[in-house]
């Protein structure tokens, strides 16, 4: 089994190169998720991951937050300005480190947050 820690910096640089330097112009939250998030946040756990699977994030945040509005606000806060002290998943930061700022616009992040709350991940490839 490969050591994820050794490959993490190179993988993060790849994600930053592909997604971090421009704002994704997409119509829907699903489109933004697929183009800017899913490269790192896979739908299901895998042997090699550079970020927590999105299903785990959504499950954890829904359990910790009272309603859709709180969920969306916390996701937006995190994606726009990820800081360890704002995380609801410190164990994920220990394993994967802090995610980079992606350069997404607030409107795009709002669409992603709404999409994540409502998504049926069994239909996402």
Image (tube, helix red, strand yellow):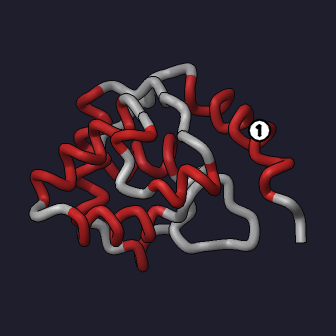
- Horizontal relation, residue 82 to residue 73: left or right: right
| Residue found at x 27% / y 28% | 106
- The answer to which quarter of the image holds residue 118 is bottom left
User: How far across and how far down the image is residue 94, in percent?
Assistant: 60, 53
| Residue found at x 44% / y 69% | 56
User: How far across and how far down the image is residue 46, in percent?
Assistant: 68, 72
| Residue found at x 55% / y 40% | 98
Give above or below for 17 relative to 52.
above
- The answer to which quarter of the image holds residue 27 is top left
**Residue 37 or 66: which is nearer the viewer?**
66
Give above or below for 100 relative to 94.
above
Give above or below for 113 relative to 80.
below
- Horizontal relation, residue 57 to residue 15: left or right: left
Quadrant of the drawing holding the N terminus: bottom right
User: How far across and how far down the image is residue 11, in percent?
Assistant: 75, 43
User: How far across and how far down the image is residue 97, in percent?
Assistant: 60, 44
- The answer to which quarter of the image holds residue 120 is bottom left
**Residue 3 or 28: which is nearer the viewer?**
3
- Horizontal relation, residue 77 to residue 65: left or right: right
| Residue found at x 69% / y 38% | 12
- Label 1 crowd bin: few (<14), some (14–19), many (20+), radius 10 Å: some
The residue that label 1 is drawn on is 9
Taking the view exactly as shown, the residue that stands out farthest to the right is 1
């Amino acid at each position: 089994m490969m050591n994820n820690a050794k490959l993490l910096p190179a993988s993060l640089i790849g994600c930053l190169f592909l997604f971090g330097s421009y704002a994704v112009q997409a119509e829907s939250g699903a489109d933004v998720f697929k183009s800017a998030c899913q490269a790192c946040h896979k739908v299901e756990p895998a042997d090699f991951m550079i970020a927590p699977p999105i299903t785990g994030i959504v499950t954890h945040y829904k359990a910790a937050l009272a309603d859709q509005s709180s969920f969306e606000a916390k996701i937006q806060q995190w994606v726009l300005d990820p800081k360890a002290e704002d995380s609801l998943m410190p164990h994920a930061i220990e394993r994967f480190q802090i995610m980079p700022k992606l350069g997404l616009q607030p409107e795009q992040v709002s669409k992603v947050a709404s999409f994540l709350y409502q998504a049926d991940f069994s239909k996402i490839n």
